[in-house]
Amino acid sequence: MNKIRILVAQLDKIFLIDTNDIIYCKSDNSYVFIYLDNMDPILLTKSLSKFEQELPNTCFLRVSQSFVINRRQIKCIDKKKRVIELNGGFFVPYTLPLKELLLFIKSKE
């Protein structure tokens, strides 16, 4: 597992985040909430599309308009409810075709 770290700047702080610790990212208009292991969410004033470009595309996938997930954090996929259960007890809805989601999960990094 490669260790990739990214810089995330807020108004008064700069975080150095290991991408393996990111569980998922959620868009809220012009803001992004980054949910991490053992830490409060980090709020960015950036679009999800722009932030997504900074993440390694081998382990992060946009599963809907508002969510990007880390495939290393997936626990379960509920096909009927169309949600993905992630580590930490998080549930993220997906609109991506199930076949595409499964191909991404099975692909090698």
Image (cartoon, rainbow, N blue to C red):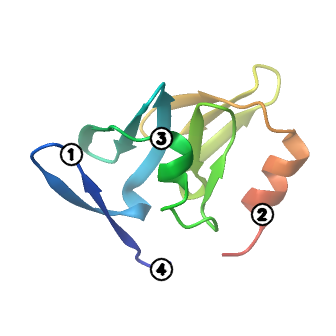
- Looking at marks 4 and 1 on the same chain, the residue that comes earlier in the sequence is marked by 4
Q: CA distance from mark 3 to mark 2?
A: 21 Å
Say which element carries label 3: strand
Near mark 1 (Cα within 10 A), the count class, few <14, some 14-19 or many ≥20, is few
Q: CA distance from mark 4 to mark 1?
A: 26 Å
Residue 47 location in percent, x, y? 48, 39
Left or right for 81, reference 68: right
Left or right for 102, reference 63: right
Residue on which the image places disc 1: 10
Relative to 46, is 22 above or below? below
Say which element carries label 2: helix
Say which element carries label 4: loop
Residue on which the image places disc 2: 106
Q: Check contact, mark 3 vs mark 1: CB within 8 A.
A: no
Amino acid type assigned to the residue bearing label 3 in the image: Cys
Residue on which the image places disc 4: 2
Q: For the C terminus, give its image quadrant.
A: bottom right
- Looking at marks 3 and 2 on the same chain, the residue that comes earlier in the sequence is marked by 3
Q: CA distance from mark 4 to mark 3?
A: 20 Å
Say which element carries label 1: loop
